[in-house]
Amino acid sequence: MIKIEDLVTINKQFHKGIIINKSSLDFAVSSTKDTKDWIKQLAYIVRAILIDHVFEEGNKRTASALIMSILELQKLAYDPQKVDEIIIKIIKNNIISITNIRRMIKNAIS
C-alpha cells in the first residue's frame, strides 16, 4: 500500500515535499484500500498527483518516479519512455478515469 509519507519522500527528490492539496491525496490513498489491484491503487494516486496537483512543485516527476518505483518493486520490466508518455497524455487530455489510467500503466509494462 502506498503511504503519503512515501509520496512526500519521492517528491523531495525533486522539490520540497510540500503538499498543497491534502484532501485529494487523502482521498486517493483511502481509495486504494477498496481494491487489492495494485495497478488500480497506483492509478488513484497518479490521478491525484497529476490532475489535482497535490504537491507545490514536481507533480509530473513525482508521478513518473512513483510509477517506475512501483513497477520495480513488482519486479516488472517497463519502458521509461512509455511512462513519460503516460504522464504527458494524462495531463494534456485531463484523463480522470481510473480505468483508463490503469490501462495506460499496464501498457507500459514490457
Image (cartoon, rainbow, N blue to C red):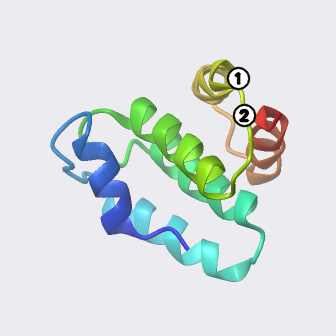
Q: Is residue 78 visible?
A: yes
Q: Position of residue 21 (x, y in %)?
A: 32, 55
The residue carrying pointer 2 sits among few (fewer than 14), some (14 to 19) or many (20 or more) residues within 10 Å by Cα, namely: some
Q: Residue at x 36, y 49 (%)?
A: 54
Task: Give the amino acid type for the residue marked by disc 1 in the picture.
Answer: Lys
Q: Residue at x 64, y 30 (%)?
A: 90
Which quadrant, please, contains the C terminus?
top right
Which residue in the rendered view is the most extreme toward the bottom?
33
Which residue in the rendered view is the most extreme toward the left?
16
Q: Position of residue 71 (x, y in %)?
A: 65, 48
Give the secondary structure at mark 1: helix
Quadrant housing residue 3 = bottom left
Depth check, front residue: 86 or 79? 79
Q: Is residue 55 visible?
A: no
Quadrant housing residue 92 = top right
Query: Mark 2 = which residue?
Result: 78
Circles 2 and 1 in contact, beta carbons < 8 Å: yes
Q: Position of residue 43 (x, y in %)?
A: 66, 53
Q: Residue at x 39, y 41 (%)?
A: 53
User: Residue 82, labelled with which disc?
Assistant: 1
Depth check, front residue: 4 or 99? 4
Task: Give the amino acid type for the residue marked by disc 2 in the picture.
Answer: Tyr
